[in-house]
Image (tube, coloured by chain):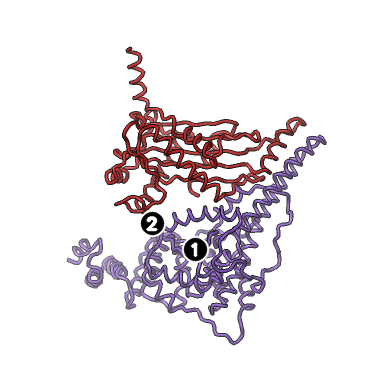
Chain colours: A red, B purple
Amino acid sequence: MRKSGLALALTASVAVSGCVQSRQFADVQFTPPQGNYRLLVMRPDVSVNSLTTGGMAEPRAEWTDQARANIIEALRAEQAGHGGQVLVLARRNELPNVSAEEIADLERLHYAVGNSIALHKYSGAALPSKRGKGLEYTLGEGAVSLGRRTGYDYALFLYAQDNIASTGRTALQVIGVAGCFIGFCAPSGGSNQFAYASLVDLRTGEVVWFNILQTGSQLPGIKFGDIRTPQGAAQMVDRLIGRMKPGSEIREAQAQVKGDR
Amino acid sequence: MCMRCVEISRRSLLVGGGALVASAATGVAQARTRPADMVPLIGPGFRPTETDEKGLWQLMDRAEEEISGSNLLVKEPELVSYLQDIIGHVGGPAAKDMRIYLAHIPDFNAMMFPSGFAVVFTGLLLRMRNEAQLAGVVAHESGHFLRRHMIRSWRDQKRKSDLFAIGAMAAGMGGAAGGVYLGDYVQLAQLGTILSLFAYSRAMEAEADAMGARLIAEAGYRPVEMANVWEQLIGEEDASARYRRKQRRRGSLFDTHPSPNSRMADLRLSATEVTVPGRIYDDRRARYLSKIAPIRQMLLEDQVKLNDPGGSQYLLNTLAQDGWNGMLRYYEGEVWRLRNRAGDDARAAQSYAVAVAYPDAPAEAWRWHGLSLIKEGRSNEGKAALGRYLRMKPAAPDAPFIRQMVG
């Protein structure tokens, strides 16, 4: 429930037009994990809703379970491509020597930090003190201690939501667009996705990379990959975490090297 | 589906709802809802079978995981099992299925979630004078679950928002085709839809009240205690508002709950209806007091720190109708001391002096009694009182400081 608050705030901040949008931020010193690293994926928070004719999002249990399973599969496949070892948590009490409360606390802390990132990096309320510093947020000692005890290098937090237009909603969209021809244009939002991912370096506790993905269209029938299907889930995971860019200082250094050649 | 949460549900309704044609059949009976008509709509071990309800439950299971692990919960096992025991008595057919959590929030509220778990605020426990009153509130919340209110109101919102979307589109198309502007009517329809959603919510609250009255009467609690809860609440809100030179909020079209006054009146009628002549009803006050004894000081401490002297005074006086004691007198003094207007120190001193005459006076009463005496220049008596404080609470955080004062 709380996560959907963040989702709402972010959806409101970006105009819903027919497109796929993603925008990532990284720590200035960030280099995407490569080679022999160990990644802990926190329990992915996934929900799939049916969008009613009137525009309400109705949660669907079976779709949600299906989508979560697909996303976890897609994540494993994606990470295997980078050579990392991945553990996806299904429950909070899965790690030896780490209590469920500790994981819950970290999730809650990340929720607050993620909200702050969303507010100050995406919703326009930029902080002057953080200008030009890339991503400068941390989960602190708790995350470091988790890394030390479990041997994981990174933790990935992931939220994904897919609203799927019902037949009634699609019909309303069709009529709304068709109305344009008689002088009454009333396009309304149809299927849309919202997702965010956040990578925490468990050696420093810092949030080193953050990305938000949004898709949606006011044209009926347009889909951007349905996460209830393995292909759609793979597409979302690829859009969300498949194209991690290094931080600004690293990029500058790389450009320098290229320039010198 | 909480007792009196106003803002949250209203906002979510405005955001989530926003729909349909004015006053289209709301399904709201304006007549009073009678306890006799309130039969539970679910049996023991209920699990959702329909798609929309299954989705809602899945979402709520996540919410329950978060709430049950929250550090805001009071986890004293005795108290938690006491609350569970009460819901087990007044929960009707679902008595064994419902869960109850106690949240440390000094406010008068309780709520039921769609999947059958309830959250009670500690502020509620402070205000209840006996077990029958607490059982009344718990029974009201059980009523929401037994009457399937959450899924019913969800479906109501869905139906109305669908109809509004279709109606607004039809008006737009029809208007465009016919060359007239129907926007004003659409706006009116939107307002109508929103109002009907609130009316539906109020009807459900009335149902839960009626169902609750029936449940507690069946469990042997004195039914009129539910109405007494509202009488106390009205008195408290009046006192609090008067103190701040404002008026208590009156009912409006946008209320999710019926006004306390009408709820009190309805509950009094319901109480007489469900009372069986000759049957003996109990309020189990002694049991209630002994169960909440371990946290009562915390409850009072939370209340006096709300900076609501009017409300706190009313509350203390209400609780004292069952007899003053050292604890209540001490907190009466605290209300004055924390208000800190001219003459309040003398009033507080008086309360502390009375408090320590009772055997149950908390250690803090002796502390403030002692400090007040010293302030008045009665140094020796003051030091004696402080000595008493130190003997009662040798490990108090300020003990070294007080020890130095006593010399």
Apparent side of residue A30 relative to residue A223 in the rendered image (left or right) = left
Q: Amino acid at mark 2?
A: Asn
Spot the residue most to the right: B178
Nearer the observer, A151 or B258: A151
Contact between labelled residues 2 and 1, with CB atoms less than 8 Å apart: no
Q: Give percent across and percent down for residue B292.
A: 40, 71
The image quadrant of residue B67 is bottom left
Spot the residue most to the left: B407
Quarter of the rendering occupied by the C terminus of chain B: bottom left
Quarter of the rendering occupied by the N terminus of chain B: bottom right
Q: Give percent across and percent down for residue A78.
A: 43, 35
Nearer the observer, B386 or B4: B4
Report which residue position mark 1 lands on: B108
SS label for mark 2: loop
Nearer the observer, A155 or A76: A76
Report which residue position mark 2 lands on: B71
**Disc 1 or disc 2, which is closer to the eye?**
2
Q: Is residue A125 visible?
A: no
Q: Chain of mark 2?
A: B
SS label for mark 1: loop
Q: Please report the residue visible at 71 percent of the width from the left and 60 percent of the height from the top.
A: B27
Q: Is residue B189 visible?
A: yes
> Which disc, if any, is residue B254?
none
User: Up-down: is B396 above or below B275?
Assistant: above
User: Up-down: is B84 above or below B220?
Assistant: above
The image quadrant of residue B30 is bottom right
